[in-house]
Amino acid sequence: MYFSFVYKTLHRVLEPASPSCLWTGVRDSPAIALTFDDGPHPQYTPQLLQILKKYSVSASFFWLGTCVQKSPDVARAVYEEGHWIGLHGYDHHPFIQMKASVLKNNLERTQAVIAQACGIDLAQVQKEVTDVRPPNGVFTSHTLDLLQQWSYRPVMWSLITEDWTQPGLSVVVQRVLQQIKNGSLIVLHDGYYGGGQDVAAIADQLIPCLLEQGYQFITVDRLWKQKFASSS
């Protein structure tokens, strides 16, 4: 898990230096969040939705605008089932390589296709769909300043499995079970860039194990509320 090792090393430096980011939930609560990047996908995401419904679990999805355009019916199903929606950019292009005007347009374009696919007023989407996870988790302080200036909320993660390398179902599940703790913000993938083909099976094995351990699944929005409450 090379990326995971590097990320954990950087995490100790980046988290305290980036307080505007959501990295994790509170440690005194068994609440955790399942998040999924790179979707929606016409096959993998509906399979995943069936598993989430089976266990009555709410999750958070960070969408690519181009994928929403390809699978609007799937996007609408995710929204109508009450899951939390965030932005992952329009086409998975690194934010740090974009000029400010291009990045702003990239996010607004993604919001626009979400509004169209889900049948929501654009003004409502611009107000409510403001959580942003940079592709590959790569950002600079300037990126965060821009997101804050535009009233977006940057979201990272605290538990990564490298599921996109397709290490196998049992490996991904074990990686989560070995690292899970109160407040964990877990990232998996249900899209086109690897890992999605196993995501439903992963969730089907993982969720009951975590429920048995006493964990409660909440959305990214509720993690933000926990963060604000703990800092007040």
Image (tube, rainbow, N blue to C red):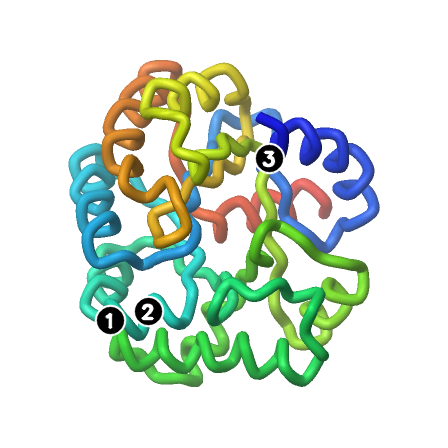
Sequence order check, earlier mark of 1 and 3: 1
Mark 2 Cα shell of 10 Å, populated few (<14), some (14-19), many (≥20) = many
The residue nearer to you, when weighing 98 against 153, is 98
In this figure, which residue is indicated by the disc labeled 1?
72
In this figure, which residue is indicated by the disc labeled 2?
68
The percent coordinates of residue 222 (x first, y second) are 49, 47
- Residue 174 falls in which quadrant of the image? top left
The percent coordinates of residue 38 (x first, y second) are 41, 55
Amino acid tagged 1: Pro
Q: Describe residue 119's horizontal placement relative to residue 166 as left or right.
A: left
Amino acid tagged 2: Val
Amino acid tagged 3: Ser
Residue at point 48%, 78% (across, down): 126
Q: Is residue 14 above or below residue 72?
A: above
Q: Distance between the residues labelled 3 and 2?
A: 26 Å
Q: Describe residue 90's horizontal placement relative to residue 225 as left or right.
A: left
Asked if the residue at tag 1 contacts the one at tag 2, i.e. Cβ–Cβ closer than 8 Å, the answer is yes
The percent coordinates of residue 43 (x first, y second) are 19, 52
Mark 3 Cα shell of 10 Å, populated few (<14), some (14-19), many (≥20) = many
Q: In this figure, what is the number of numbered marks?
A: 3
Residue at point 24%, 31% (across, down): 201
Q: Is residue 195 above or below residue 182?
A: below
Residue at point 37%, 21% (across, down): 210
- Identify the disc placed on residue 180: none
The residue nearer to you, when weighing 112 against 198, is 198
- Look at the numbered disc 2 and give the secondary structure of its residue: helix
Q: In this view, does 133 lie above or below 162?
A: below
Q: How far apart are marks 1 and 3 (CA)?
A: 30 Å
In this figure, which residue is indicated by the disc labeled 3?
158
